[in-house]
Image (spheres, grey):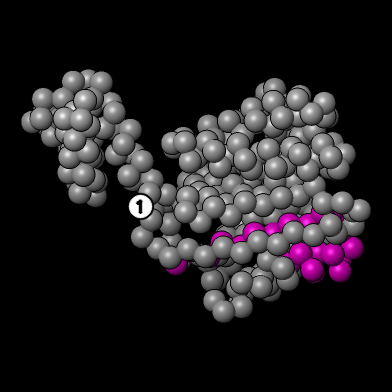
Amino acid sequence: MAYVKGRLEQLARIVDRHLAQDPAEALERLGGQLGLSADELGAVEARVQRLRDRRFSMPVSAHGATGRGGRSQNEDAFLVERKLRLFAVADGMGGYRGGATAAAAALRGLRDAVAGGRVDLEQAVLAANEVVLETAARAGYHKAGSTIVTLWLADDEVRLAWVGDSRCYRYDGARLAPLTRDHRLFGHVLEQALGREHVVPESVVERATPATYLLCSDGVTDVLGEGELLQHLRVGPKRLAGAAAAIVDAATRAGTRDNATALVVRVG
């Protein structure tokens, strides 16, 4: 067993050096050279993908803030997992206890899925949905649910997935671009949210370039337009740490009726 493990690790290291070329071809060629079985080769492929997902050549910084806004309690939550380069915002619903519980469960389920090797972010969001369903059922919060928007930096890609109306924007130094589409039927009635049996996440994948990403709940976007958001993101690196708190404060001053959460992620 130790011998096989050593062979797998040797092949994984070799293949990782070939990833910039053709990883599939490198796997097939080197697997044949070492006489690996189909099961062994499958194990190496999974390991190589994990190696790729750990690679990210640009510096990353992230800062989040959340506030009660116009509510008496806060059902929003955000996630900053620097080691995984995983970031998310969740907006809970279903009454304070149910909403806060659902948001926390969503972020916990997402983190555990990515840390456990889920390389498809949509699948990780579906895993988070299962955790919300199980947690709400155990606690008796039958109407509990949560939105989620998540950003994962892996293999020099920006991977984004979401369910609900929490949003993500990209600021590239010139313009602010929305990357998500609200899952709303009308008004504040959601088309879908975590905590429901049938959920279909949407996702976007793009090559990483220097940019600032803003993840936020609807308590921010209901009262602040893109021009106002841009004012807070168009700052130097030393002031970027305060941008999330400034956005939450601005939403509160603008009279948001909901909780307000902002998470700013700088790439490059």
Q: Amino acid at mark 1?
A: Arg
Secondary element type, mark 1: loop
Residue 102's image quarter? top right
Q: Residue at x 76, y 34 (%)?
A: 145
At 32% from the left and 44% from the top, the residue drawn is: 51
As rendered, which of 190 and 129 lies closer to the eye?
A: 129
- Would you call the spot at circle 1 few (<14 residues within 10 Å), some (14-19), or many (20 or more)? some
Q: Can residue 122 be seen from the camera position used here?
A: no
Q: Is residue 93 left or right of residue 54?
A: right
In the picture, measured across the screen, residue 158 lies left or right of residue 236, that is left
Q: Quadrant of residue 183?
A: top right
Give how far across and how far down residue 65 sits, in percent: 70, 62
> Residue at image x 84%, y 57%?
68
Q: Residue furthest left?
A: 33
Look at mark 1 in the image and give the residue it sits on. 55
Can residue 148 be seen?
yes
Residue 198 in picture, x, y percent from top left: 67, 23
User: Foreground: 2 or 85?
Assistant: 2
Camera-nearest residue between 143 and 20: 143
Q: Position of residue 170 (x, y in %)?
A: 57, 60
Camera-nearest residue between 268 and 92: 92
Side (left or right) of 8 relative to 261: left
Chain part drawn in magenta: 247-268
